[in-house]
Amino acid sequence: MELKDTRSGFGAGLTQLGRTNNNIVALCADLTGSLNMNNFRDENPDRFFQIGIAEANMIGIAAGMTIGGKIPFTGTFANFSTSRVYDQIRQSVAYSNKNVKICASHAGITLGEDGATHQVLEDIGMMKMLPHMVVINPCDHNQTKAATIAIAEYVGPVYLRFGRPKVPNFTPINQKFEIGKAIQLKDGQDVTIFATGHLVWEAIEASKTLLNEGISAEIINIHTIKPLDNKAILESVKKTKCVVTAEEHMINGGLGDSIAQLLSKRYPTPVEMVGVNDSFGESGPPMKLMEKYGLTALEITKAAKKVISRKSNE
């Protein structure tokens, strides 16, 4: 299995957009290399703006650029794309419904050695609560590239979340990304695992272990947190009657919360959630941190068995 980082998928998508749409502009807060924005900068020097370590200014400039018909893509780490500039995003982008694409790398615990101050684990919750904001969390390099291209066609504010580490690159190379359309990766009968971002691959691995134990798990990639694909979720849950959610994010406010909210209103169902439980991160190797914070195929497997037992007892 080829390993590639999702941030380079963003860079590849942005480069392609720069060659096909003259209204695309890119702004960066002193992290051009880290976000793989170098190619866009080199090919389009008049459409690239290095703002420096001034993220709030970057969001304000991007919002202003939309008035002239430009489609700005802002780039910095996820913590600096959300927590540091939430007021500017709320007022100048979301409330004003500006066509800004907020592209955030190094999200989640897999940022690794930079530690807790940089490992944002609450960004999905913050951004999905903003009216008008679309929230996307792709699972691999190819899907991130496709999502980057797709959000340029969507008119309105978007938060695109991706990461630093090299992870399995398993989705089709020339896929068409559909905002708000969940993807079924594996059919199953006993439990549905809804996963997003880096944990989609972990869910696939968990399904193999479960199958060896006679448990048929349905795997659905929820790449768009908002708008949520209610139809796909309900169709699957009505078949399997129990759910596991998996995300590299805080349990509070994340994908699990969104799915539980939907099910509580439309189809009450046992749910177990795999995610970070009310904790900041810490410095360390990304995969070791995934193990420590329970964001692995093993934990998804355990959650699936637990929720199936709950279903059987209800």
Image (cartoon, rainbow, N blue to C red):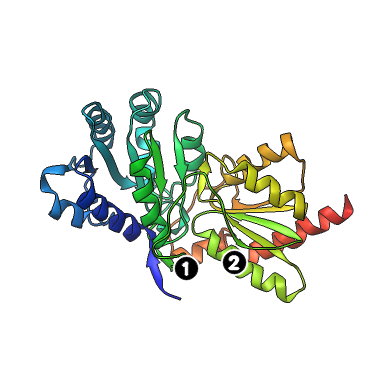
Give the mark count: 2
Task: Check disc 1: other Cα within 10 Å, few if <14, some if 14-19, many if 20+.
Answer: some
Q: Within 10 angstroms of label 2, few (less than 14), some, or many (20 or more) residues? A: many
Amino acid type, residue under disc 1 in the picture: Phe
Q: x and y percent of residue 105 in the render? A: 36, 51
| Secondary structure type for disc 1 | loop
Q: Single out the residue that lies furthest toward the right.
A: 313
Identify the residue at image location x=35%, y=50%. 148
* Labels 2 & 1 near each other (Cβ < 8 A): yes
Q: Position of residue 5 (x, y in %)?
A: 37, 63
- Residue at label 1? 170
Query: Which residue is rendered at x = 62% and y = 46% of the image?
Result: 256
273 relative to 174 in the view: left or right:
right
Secondary structure state at the residue bearing disc 2: helix
Label of residue 204 in the image: 2
Vertical side of 216 occupied by 50: above or below: above
Image quadrant where residue 152 sits: top left
| Residue 60 visible | yes
* Quarter of the figure with residue 64: top left
Q: Nearer the viewer, mark 2 or mark 1?
A: 1
Say which label, 2 or 1, has the lower sequence index: 1
